[in-house]
Amino acid sequence: MEISGPNSQKTEAKSDKSVSNVAKPATAGATAKSSATSGNQSGQADTVSLTDTAARLKELEMGLANQPVVDTQRVQSVQSAINDGTFEVDPDSVAEKMIDFETGLDETS
C-alpha cells in the first residue's frame, strides 16, 4: 500500500502484525490486595480480585442507589405545616447556615 501526499512518506503495509500482552508493573506503595493475569496465547482469560474494602464500597453504592432521592415523608410534613400555618422559621438558624455555606464555598476556591 502506498500513501502519498504533501506531508507523507512512502509506507508499506505489513500483513503479519502481532501484539502481545504486557503486564504493567504495580505502582509503588500500592496497598490493595489484587491479582491480575494477562491473557496469553493459550486463551487464558484476564482475572482481577478486589479488596474487601472495594467489595464493601460496591455494596454500599448499590444500597444508596435503592434509596429515594427525596425524603417524601419530610416534604409532606413541611407542606402540611405550611398549609396549616404552623411552620415556623428560625431566622438566626437560617442566617448561621447561610454563613456556614458561604464560608465553605470560599474554602474550596
Image (cartoon, grey):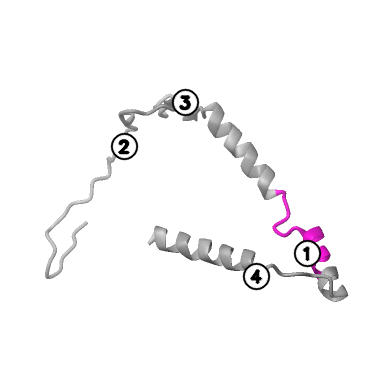
Disc 4 crowd rating (10 Å Cα; few below 14, some 14-19, many 20+) is: few
Q: Amino acid at mark 1?
A: Val
What residue is at 48 percent from the left and 65 percent from the top?
102
Per the model, the C-alpha gap separating discs 2 and 1 is 59 Å
Q: Is residue 99 above or below residue 84?
A: above
Q: Earlier in the sequence, mark 4 or mark 1?
A: 1
What distance separates the C-alpha of mark 4 from that of mark 1? Answer: 20 Å
Front tag of 3 and 4: 4
Q: Which element carries disc 3, helix, strand or loop?
A: loop
Q: Which residue is mark 3?
A: 44
Q: Quadrant of residue 24?
A: top left
Please report whichever mark, 3 or 4, sits nearer to the chain's N-terminal start: 3
What amino acid type should be assigned to the residue bearing mark 3? Gln
What kind of residue is marked 2? Answer: Val
Q: Does the magenta segment cover residue 35?
A: no
Q: Which mark is residue 75?
A: 1
Point out the tag, 3 or 1, that comes first from the N-terminus: 3
Please name the residue shown 40% across and 58% down the image.
107
| Nearer the observer, 40 or 49 | 49
Sequence-wise, which precedes: disc 2 or disc 1?
2
Question: Neighbour class for label 3 at 10 Å: few (<14), some, many (≥20)?
Answer: few
Q: Bounds of the magenta span? A: 66-79
Query: For the view shown, which residue lies furthest in the right direction?
Result: 84
Cβ atoms at labels 4 and 1 below 8 Å apart? no
- Whether 67 is among the magenta residues is yes
Residue 91's disc number: 4
